[in-house]
Amino acid sequence: MKIVLFTPGLGNQMFQYLFYLYLRDNYPNQNIYGYYNRNILNKHNGLEVDKVFDIQLPPHTVISDASAFFIRALGGLGLKYFIGKDQLSPWKVYFDGYWQNKEYFQNNVDKMRFREGFLNKKNDDILSLIRNTNSVSVHVRRGGYCDSCRKDLFLQSCTPQYYESAISVMKEKFQKPVFFVFSDDIPWVKVNLNIPNAYYIDWNKKENSYLDMYLMSLCTASIIANSTFSFWGAMLGNKKELVIKPKKWIGDEIPEIFPPSWLSL
């Protein structure tokens, strides 16, 4: 038996679901379960991945949930033998991590297909523009990254200078690019970034925030932030003509997830 913990954040849950598929493919004789602790998941938008994508979540049973609870309790006492933390070991049972490595998702990423859904007029109008222009998505994440204890860790990678350089590259690459800006802090973007020919998308909130990812996935090119949500917006959908990412991800950490064709700035 192996159990995969699902944590808050759509981008994180996508990595965790794809890791589950990796385990299922590589351990065909074992039962693979999911663990969905509502106290953990409800810190954000809850369990989102199966609502957004046409997938079937890993099963869970009373026994698998009790096993996960017991293993977590042992871990709290310092007994972590059965816990795999962002590292796959055959004898581990409970897997707690983000699993950000190409090895775990590259063979199944094509299974992440958005569910068919209704777009309101605002999103439908933006989608039409995206499909009929040299569309460049620009994702700027602020939110929790602005907490005083996290600024140095998260925000030094995606400075105004990073975005300005990336926009300059896109202007050289494409004729008349149109920039579609997705952010949880559009007022900050408008004050601090000079983005020409831009549309600002700030109305997809909470349970509808995945629509930003959907729209980003259909752009011609992408400028991403150091977030898993941003990564998947560039990774899915149309094959991008160019993706620009920050040289550093979180602190000095650079996860093994990026296609070699993506440009680092």
Image: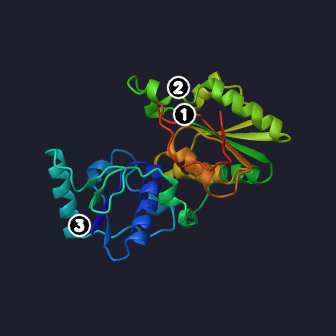
Image coords of residue 193 (percent x, y): 66, 25
Which comes before the other along the chain, label 2 or label 3?
3
Q: Which mark is residue 64?
A: 3
Crowding near the residue tagged with mark 1, few <14, some 14–19, many ≥20 C-alpha atoms within 10 Å: some
Image coords of residue 26 (percent x, y): 41, 70
Q: Residue 156 carries which label?
A: 2
| Residue holding disc 1 | 248
Labels 3, 1: front one: 1
Which comes before the other along the chain, label 2 or label 1?
2
Q: Which of 41 and 78 is in front in this view?
A: 78
Q: How far apart are marks 2 and 1 (CA)?
A: 8 Å
Asked if residue 112 lies left or right of residue 134, the reply is left
Image coords of residue 219 (percent x, y): 70, 50
Q: CB under 8 Å between callouts 2 and 1?
A: yes
Asked if residue 186 lies left or right of residue 22, the reply is right
Tell me the element at label 2: loop
Q: CB under 8 Å between callouts 2 and 3?
A: no
Which comes before the other along the chain, label 3 or label 1?
3
- Is residue 31 visible in the rendered structure shown here? yes
- Is residue 204 visible in the rendered structure shown here? no
Q: Distance between the residues labelled 3 and 1?
A: 38 Å
Q: Which amino acid does label 2 sit on?
A: Gln
- In the picture, which quadrant includes the N terminus? bottom left
Q: What residue type is labelled 3?
A: Ser
Tell me the element at label 1: loop
Q: Which amino acid does label 1 sit on?
A: Lys
Q: Which quadrant would residue 124 be assigned to in this image?
A: bottom right
